[in-house]
Amino acid sequence: MAGPAVRRGVTLGLGALWWWAVARLVLAPDAGGLEGAIAAGGWGLSLLPVHCVPKGRAAGAVGAGRWRQAWRAGRPSGAGRSGGAGAATTASPPRRSGGRSGPS
């Protein structure tokens, strides 16, 4: 049972430190960089629980290995890592102009 009590104590202590830094920035004319760093750091840490979700619970999360699988599926057959034989792109097929180059 010492774990939750210690965690609460640390949370309350860091919260008190943050409020001290914010109050000092607002009220004291000689507040400086230390108070600003503590206030900015505490504010930044407060955003983490909102934006960070375990990947397994995130809506629309792509499973492990899916990007690699999709990347391999998009390669032409025979294309190796070095882009050897068969690595030509198929994005722009050759024009079918009847062999003429230019207007006649």
Image (spheres, rainbow, N blue to C red):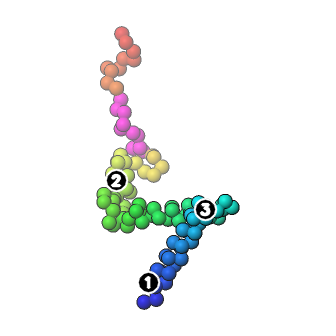
Determine which residue is flagged by label 3. 27
Q: Disc 3 vs disc 2: which is toward the camera?
A: 3
10 Å neighbourhood of mark 1: few (<14), some, or many (≥20)?
few
Q: Earlier in the sequence, mark 1 or mark 3?
A: 1
* Disc number placed over residue 70 in the picture, else none: 2
Q: Amino acid at mark 2?
A: Ala
Residue located 37% across and 67% down the image: 54
Say whether residue 54 is magenta.
no
Task: Decide if residue 84 is in sight here.
Answer: yes
Determine which residue is flagged by label 1. 4
Highlighted magenta segment, given as a residue range: 85-94
**Most prominent secondary structure in the magenta stretch?**
loop
Residue located 57% across and 65% down the image: 23
Asked if residue 51 lies left or right of residue 57, the reply is: right
Q: Quadrant of residue 39?
A: bottom right
Which SS class for mark 2? helix
Which SS class for mark 3? helix
Residue 62: % across, % down:
33, 59
Q: Residue furthest right?
A: 30
Q: Is residue 99 above or below residue 26?
A: above
Q: Is residue 84 above or below residue 20?
A: above
Residue located 39% across and 15% down the image: 102
Q: Amino acid at mark 3?
A: Leu
Label 1 with label 3: CB-CB less than 8 Å: no
Q: Nearer the viewer, residue 55 or 102?
A: 55
